[in-house]
Image (tube, helix red, strand yellow):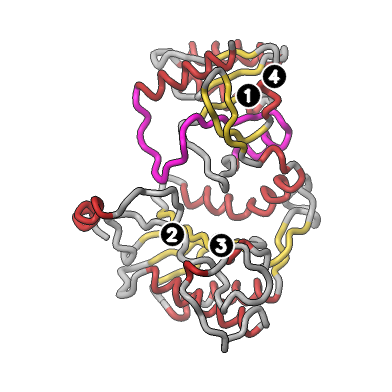
Amino acid sequence: MDHQAFEKHKPFAGEKNPSMLRRRVGHDYESRRVYLITMTVEGRRPLLGRLVGDADAPDDSPDAPRVEPSPLGEAVRQCWFSIHDHYPEVEVLALQLMPDHLHGILFVTCQMEQHLGMVLKGFKAGCNKAYRALGFASPSMPQPSRPSMPQHCCGKGNQGFLFSRNYNDHILEGNGELERWFHYLHSNPRRLAIRRAHPDYFRVRFGITICGQTYAAIGNRFLLDSPEKLQVQCSRSLTDEQVATTVEQMLAKARRGVVLVSPAISKGEQAVMRAVLDAHLPLIFLTPWGFNQFSRPGHQYYEACAEGRFLILAPWEHQNQRIPLTREMCLQLNAMAASICR
């Protein structure tokens, strides 16, 4: 849908609920681009494989975390890598199977006659055929419309559909983003292993009230009980030398047991946050981007969360799109950090 059509229909669309499944307004999904695709198994059932390995094992170890595909998962993998056979304009760059979902990267090398959605519809059709052939559903059963299908269904009786309705896409923009997403896919089994080893640190908690402000939280909430907490607030006008001095001062306090609190808005605050995480010291981070029930910490925060030295607090509700930070939002986040420290 282009912007003109979007704005025309917007008044009749009703309330905009949080969703990861919307397409980008104004993008045709037929032109030359690289796409990160995510699909989830209907009901989030772990049908595609099982996680094996040790969360602490290095990547080059035979015990490194990985997902061993099930027969169905292997069939899905074959369907994914055969996309190019059916659509020569589409190169398959990567696939990461997880027990209940998949991530894949596709490169549309030239203008397509078909919409990307049609490519993925064909992929799903092949997966559904394998799903039925392996005995998970009967092809002779009537297939109701998707909205009537229960999300908690398990085992047989899913009426022939392997994946949930629709999919999530992310359009890669360059500037090293492709390399970062390759790393993200590769490390996904390790992140799952870490979450399973430390489930409480990765579970979103809603309705946490601190000094009259309600937050959603991911991480070690006991950091809030620290007797010494210090707000990190740095002026945007600091020179590089002043930032370096501030970083050393804050690190010295953190090493003495002080828990630093920051929304990491200015370059100085961001430098302190990076240094604290690299030094494996405790930190409370206020994010303007809200959580939903499926939210997870960014991959750069997984180790800190697993070790119980990181807490992310989100004072505002989850939004589908990240809006630019306003001055008012920055002032509010800094005021919240000050309140937490008091």
Q: Nearer the viewer, residue 105 or 203?
A: 203
187 left or right of 235 in image: right
Question: For mark 4, does the 10 Å Cα neighbourhood hold few (<14), some (14 to 19), or many (20 or more) residues?
Answer: few
For discs 4 and 3, the disc positioned in front in the rendered view: 4
Q: Quadrant of the C terminus?
A: top right
Q: Earlier in the sequence, mark 1 or mark 4?
A: 4
Classed neighbour count for the residue bearing mark 2: other residues with Cα under 10 Å, few (<14), some (14–19), many (≥20): many
| Amino acid type indicated by mark 2 | Tyr
Label 3, label 2: how far apart the Cα atoms are? 16 Å
Measured from the top left, where is residue 21 in percent x and y?
44, 57
Mark linked to residue 225: 4
Query: Is 125 covered by the magenta stretch?
Result: no
Q: 275 or 141: nearer the eye?
A: 141
Residue located 50% across and 24% down the image: 263
Amino acid type, mark 1: Leu
Q: In the rendered structure, are the residues bearing label 2 and label 4 in contact, judged by CB atoms less than 8 Å apart?
A: no
> Can you say which quadrant of the picture contains the N terminus?
bottom left
Front-most of 18 and 108? Answer: 18
Question: Residue 180, percent across and down?
Answer: 52, 48
Residue range highlighted in magenta: 300-327
Q: Are the two marked residues, 3 and 2, in contact with CB atoms closer than 8 angstroms?
A: no
Tag 2 residue:
35
Find residue 77 and report its image quarter.
bottom right
Q: Amino acid at mark 3?
A: Thr
In the rendered structure, are the residues bearing label 1 and label 3 in contact, judged by CB atoms less than 8 Å apart?
no
The answer to which of marks 1 and 3 sits earlier in the sequence is 3
Q: Is residue 145 above or below residue 231?
A: below
Instruction: Classify mark 1: helix, strand or loop.
Output: strand
Nearer the observer: mark 2 or 4; the answer is 4
Mark toward the viewer: 3 or 2: 3
